Amino acid sequence: MFDIKAKDMRGRVGVLKTNHGDVKTPALMPVIHPRKQAIDVKKYGADIVITNAYLIYKDDELKQKALDKGLHELINFSGPVMTDSGSFQLSVYGDIDISNKEVIEFQDLIGSDIGTSLDIPTAPFVDREKAENDLKITIERAKEAVKIKKENNIKMLLNSVVQGSTFPDLRQDCATQLASLDADLYPIGAVVPLMESYHYKDLVDVVMNSIMYLPDDVPRHLMGAGHPMVFALAVAMGCDLFDSAAYILYAEDDRLLSTRGTFKLENLQEMPCSCEVCSKYTPDDLRAMPKKQRRDLIAQHNLYVSFAELRLIRQAIYEGSLMELVEQRCRAHPALLDAVRQLANYNEDFEKYDPRSKKSAFFYTGSESLKRPEVLRHHQKLKEMSKKRDLIVLPPSRKPYSKFISGKLGEFHVFGSEQEIDLDNTDFMVLDVPFGLIPLEIDEVYPLSQNDSPKIKDVDSLEYLSNFLSDFIKNYEQILIHSKIIKELNIGLYNKSVNSDEIRYKKDDIKKIRAIADYQFGNGAGDALFKGNINVEKSKKTGKIRHVYDGKTLIVNMRASDSFLVLSKEGARRLHESCPYPKNRIVVNKDSEPFALDGKSVFSKFVVECDENIRARDEVLIVNEEDKLLAYGKSLLSACEINEFMSGQAIKTRKGMKK
Amino acid sequence: MFDIKAKDMRGRVGVLKTNHGDVKTPALMPVIHPRKQAIDVKKYGADIVITNAYLIYKDDELKQKALDKGLHELINFSGPVMTDSGSFQLSVYGDIDISNKEVIEFQDLIGSDIGTSLDIPTAPFVDREKAENDLKITIERAKEAVKIKKENNIKMLLNSVVQGSTFPDLRQDCATQLASLDADLYPIGAVVPLMESYHYKDLVDVVMNSIMYLPDDVPRHLMGAGHPMVFALAVAMGCDLFDSAAYILYAEDDRLLSTRGTFKLENLQEMPCSCEVCSKYTPDDLRAMPKKQRRDLIAQHNLYVSFAELRLIRQAIYEGSLMELVEQRCRAHPALLDAVRQLANYNEDFEKYDPRSKKSAFFYTGSESLKRPEVLRHHQKLKEMSKKRDLIVLPPSRKPYSKFISGKLGEFHVFGSEQEIDLDNTDFMVLDVPFGLIPLEIDEVYPLSQNDSPKIKDVDSLEYLSNFLSDFIKNYEQILIHSKIIKELNIGLYNKSVNSDEIRYKKDDIKKIRAIADYQFGNGAGDALFKGNINVEKSKKTGKIRHVYDGKTLIVNMRASDSFLVLSKEGARRLHESCPYPKNRIVVNKDSEPFALDGKSVFSKFVVECDENIRARDEVLIVNEEDKLLAYGKSLLSACEINEFMSGQAIKTRKGMKK
C-alpha cells in the first residue's frame, strides 16, 4: 500500500497505491469543491485530490449524482480521491446530522479511494478535560470505522485521524492506540489554528508526538496544511500528504502563496515567482482584471508554487539535502526558525531515521546545524570508539584533513599529565565545525569531509567547540592542543607550550582501514577484517584506497563517494565470524532463506529481527534465525522501518553466500 | 540618466534612461551572441541585453551589417543594448588587435546604447605589481574614452570599469579616480573567478571597496555575474546591473540555475521550480530530447528563474525586506553565509544608506541579523540619548512592550550604588533581541516594535545581550535588572534582590512624545516642540497617539505605521528655532527658494548642503543658505545621495511656509 523510495531525516519519497492509481509522496491534495470547482487542478500538477463527503451527502442533487455515477465523475477527476467526513464542519457548526457509520458507508458507496471516520478536531490550547473527552470519541469512532471496514469487506482505504490538542501525551496516546488499528493512513488533525497563529514551535511538538508513535509503513497526512512555507519542515518530520484549500481561498482574497510567506496583491509591485502567471502578468495587470479572472490566475500561481515546492522537496530527499532546505525555508519567519530549533529536542528520534550516507554534502547554515542528527550520531560513535592514551588536537586544514596535514605541525599546549609522547599510543584529531573532533584515520568517511561551514565562526560554534573539547579530553591522560585552537577558543594559558619536531602525523593505510571498519561496524571489526597478508590498492587518479586484499582475496572495497567499506564475500564471512549476534545483521525467516542464499534482495516482511543500529545505506549481513550467514547487502531502510514494513525491499543484496 | 525609485540597504530600484528606452534596475542583461543567438530573450523578461562589440568588429560580415543597419537590427533587439569592448577576450587570449580609441568609436558608430572602454580585467590574487600596472592602463583608457566621448560629442553612454584585483586599496583608488571622470555607468570587473571559486567573502570586499568610492547617482554593473544565487547579495551592496551568459552556457552543459545553486540535469529526479518548463516537463522528458531542444528549454528555465529573482529583489526593496531575502538566500552555501557575515565589516557604510523606516518588520534570521545597520543605528541613538540617574531593565513582553507592561514588575537585582529609587529620575528599558535595550517611551518607533526574533535564543544572542547590557549600565548610578534577565543571561549573583511595589512603569504621553522627538530629531527637540498647552489626541480604534496640539495648534502627527512624528507648520517652526544649523536641514540654493516656499518638491540638484545624518524617510526642514525656513517634508534619499544626485527628487515637500 505504501513503499519508500528515498529517505532523508524523517522525510520520505514514497508511493501510495490506491484504486485509482499510484501517488508519489510527499503529495499535495488540492481541495475540490463538489459544486463550484473553478480550476482544473490536474493541469497544474495534482495527482490526487480531496473533497468533502459530508457536503455531498447534505446536498440532495450532489448526493444522487455521486451515488449514481460515482464520486470521480461528480468532481470530474479520474485519479485518486480522498474524502473528508465532515469533522471540519462539526468543529465549526457544532453537531452535525450524520453518524460515523453512515459517513463511512456513504464514502465507500460513492467510490472514494480514501475515506475518513468522523473524528473530533480539538482545537489547540483547550483545557485538558475537553481534549480527553473529545479524544475518547475520536478513538472510538476510528475503531468503529475499522470494524465496519473489516465486517463489510470495504476496499476503500481508511484515514484514522490523530487528535489530542496540544497535549503531547494525548497525541502520543492517540497515535499509539490508532497504530494498533492498522488504518491505511494517519492524518494529524486540528493543526490549522497553530499554523494560522504562527505557533510553529507547538506544531513541531504536536506532529512529533504523533508521528513518533505511528507506524512507519503508513502515510501521514498533515490535515489542512496547504501553505508551501511549511511543507519542507513538515516533510522532514515525516509528513507525506498535505491538502490545500489555501490555493483557492487565498486567491479569493487576492493573496499569493510563496515559500517565503504570503503576498497581498495590493502590496505587490512585482510578481514574485517564475511561474507562467508571474512571468506573463504584472501586479497592475491582475489588479485591472475582473475578479473571477484574477482569482483563477492567482489560484494557478498558488498551485504552481505549491507543486514546485513539493518537487523540490522530493529532489532534496533524493539528494540528502532536505535539512539544508528546511533550514533555509524556515528563515522566512522567526516563528519558523523557532520550529527548526525545536526539532533539536527530537534529535535522537531523527537519528534513527536519517540515512548513514547522502549524495549531498552537509552544509552548516547557522547554529541550528550543530543540532542535526548527523552530529549527534558522530558524537555517539566517538564515545564508543576505543581510545589511545594521549590525544593531539589539530586545527582544520583543507578537507580531507588527513590529505593536507603533514610535516611539522607547529606549537602545542599541554593539558593533563605531562609525559613523553608516544605517537603509537596517541589519537590525532582535528577540531572543526560542525562535527567537533574528527579522528584523522576516519576523516574521509561521510559526512566528516563532505561538509562545509563558514570561515567566520559564530559564537555558538566557538562555544560548542570549546565545550565539546573540554568534555572529550577527559578520556585521555595527556592532551596536546594546537596553539591556533588555544587562541581561537581563548582557552586559559595555565599550561606550557610544546614545539616538538617529533609530533608528526604518520599516515598508515592499515590503521586507516581498521579505524574505518571499527567506526562503521563496531570496535574490533578492523582487526577481524584485516588480518593476514593485507595489501591495499589505490586509485591511480585520486590516490584514494579502492580495494583491500588478504593476499589475493578481496576483503572490502572502499566506496569513493563516502569512504564507507563495502564487504566482499570474504569480508562478510570475517565480519560475521567476529561480531556477536545480532550486530550488523538482518535476520530473515526460513521461507526466504533460499532466496537470500541466491542473492535475491530481502523484503521487509521476511525480516524477523535486526540490529537496531542499522540505518539506511549501511552494509549489513543477512543471516537466518540460527545466525547462519546467507548473504550480505546494503540496507535501504533504518532498523525501525525494517521492523515495521510489511511490503517493499529492505535490503539490496550484494551477493548470496551460495554463489 | 539614473533615478532612484525605492531603496533598502545599499540596494535601489532605479530607472536607467537610454536612447532605446528606460530600464528598471536591478536588471539582468542576457548576453546575446551576435552570430548564433538561439533564444528570444525578450520573451522571457529581458528589457536590456549585452553583446560583444569586439566579436562584431572582428567578423567582416557582422561588422558590415552592423555598420549598415545598426547594432539593434543585427542582433534583432529593439530595446537598449550594451556592448563590451573585448577586454574579456583580451584576458583570455592575451593581446588583441584593436585600440581603445577604435573600439569606442566603433561602438558609437554601430549605435550601441552603452559602450565600454578597453579595460584590463586583472584576475584575483595576482601579485601587486601586476595589479598596479594593469590598473594604470585601465584608468588611462577610461580617461581617454571619456575624452573621446566629449570631443566627438558622442551620445552613447560610457562604462568605466573598476579593476584592481583583490587589493582593497587598488579598488578604492580606481573607483575614486573613475568617479572624477563622470562616466555614465561603473562596471565592477574581473569578479567572475571569485564567484566561480566560491570566494564570496572576497567578492564582498572587492565590491564594497569599489562601490563605497563610486558616486551614488550612477548605476553599477557587476560584470559577469549571471547566477541568481548572488543577485540579492550583490544588490544589497549596491549593484544595479548584471549580465548573464550563464543562462545559455549552463544550458549547453545541461545545468539548471536556481537561487539555491546549480542543478545538473543528470542528478535531477524532479524539476526544481515553478516555471513553465519545470511545470511541463520531467527530467526524464528533457534527457530524452535532442540536445538543441533540451538546451533551449533549460536556457528558458534559466532566464525564468533569473528574472523572477530580480522581480523578487525589487519587490523586497519596495517592502524593505531586502536583508531578510539576502540572509535567506545566502544559506544556500556556507561560502555565501561567510559573505553575509563579511557585510558586517561595512556596517557603518550601510547605515548611511538604509532608510529610517520600512514597510516590513525586521526579522531575525540568525546571528548575522545582530550586525544589521538598523541595530548599529539604534545603538548610536542610544549613546546620544540623554540619560537619567538610574536604570530599570525589564524582560520583553509582547510588543509594543509599553502597551503590555503594567502593575507589579516583579523581582530585581541591584547593580551599582544602592540608593532610594526615584522613578522620575529613572530610565525604563526592555532588554531584547536584536536591538539590545529599548527605552519604553520610544518602543513603538520603527523598528523597535516592528521586529520579531525566535523565542529559543542562540548563544550569539545571549552573549550579545549580556555584553551590551554590561557595557550600557556604566552610564547609570544605580541599575535594577529584572530577575528573569539575571537568570537567562546567567549573570553573577553578587547583588541583592529587590521586590518593591514602588517599582512601576507609569505611562506618560507627554514624556513619550518628547522622547520620540529627541530620538528622531536630537536631544532637546522634545522640549522645543511640546511646550505650551499640550494635548494629545488618540485613535479611538487603536488607542495610539495620532495628533499633538498646543492649544488648538497642531504640532505633529504621529504616523501609525512607524510612530515617527510628522511635523506640522508650527512643528517645523519650533524645530527650526530650537535646533542649530544644519541639523535636520536640507539647504537649497537661491533659485529654488520660491518653489520650496510654494510647497513644490525639492530636486537634488538644488540642494547645496544637508545634515549628514539625514536618511531616507526622515522628516526634514528645508531652508535657504541664510537658514530661513522655506518648507518641510520627507526625505526620499540619504544625505550622501542627496549630495551626489544631480537629477530626481530629494525631498517630498509636505508644505511650503508661504501658504
Image: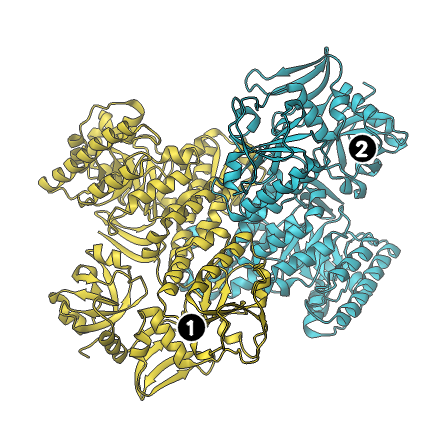
Chain colours: A yellow, B cyan
Circle 1 packing at 10 Å, graded few (<14), some (14-19), many (20+), is: some
* SS for callout 1: loop
Chain at numbered mark 1 = A
| Identity, as a three-letter code, of the amino acid under mark 1 | Arg
| Spot occupied by residue B42 in the image (x, y as percentages of width and height) | 59, 51
Picture residue at 28% right of the left edge, 62% below the top: A614
Q: Is A179 left or right of A42, judged from the image as shown?
A: left
Same chain assignment for discs 1 and 2: no
Residue B534 placement: quadrant: top right
Q: Position of residue A15 (x, y in %)?
A: 28, 53
Q: Nearer the viewer, mark 1 or mark 2?
A: 1
Q: Residue furthest left?
A: A151
Front residue of A342/B616: it is A342
- Mark 1–mark 2 distance (CA, rounded to whole Å): 69 Å
Residue B93 left/right relative to A567: right
Q: The C terminus of chain A appears in which quarter of the rendering? A: bottom left
What residue is pinned by disc 2? Answer: B583
The relative height of residue B369 versus residue B127 in the rendered view (above or below) is: above
Tell me the residue that label 1 is attached to. A389
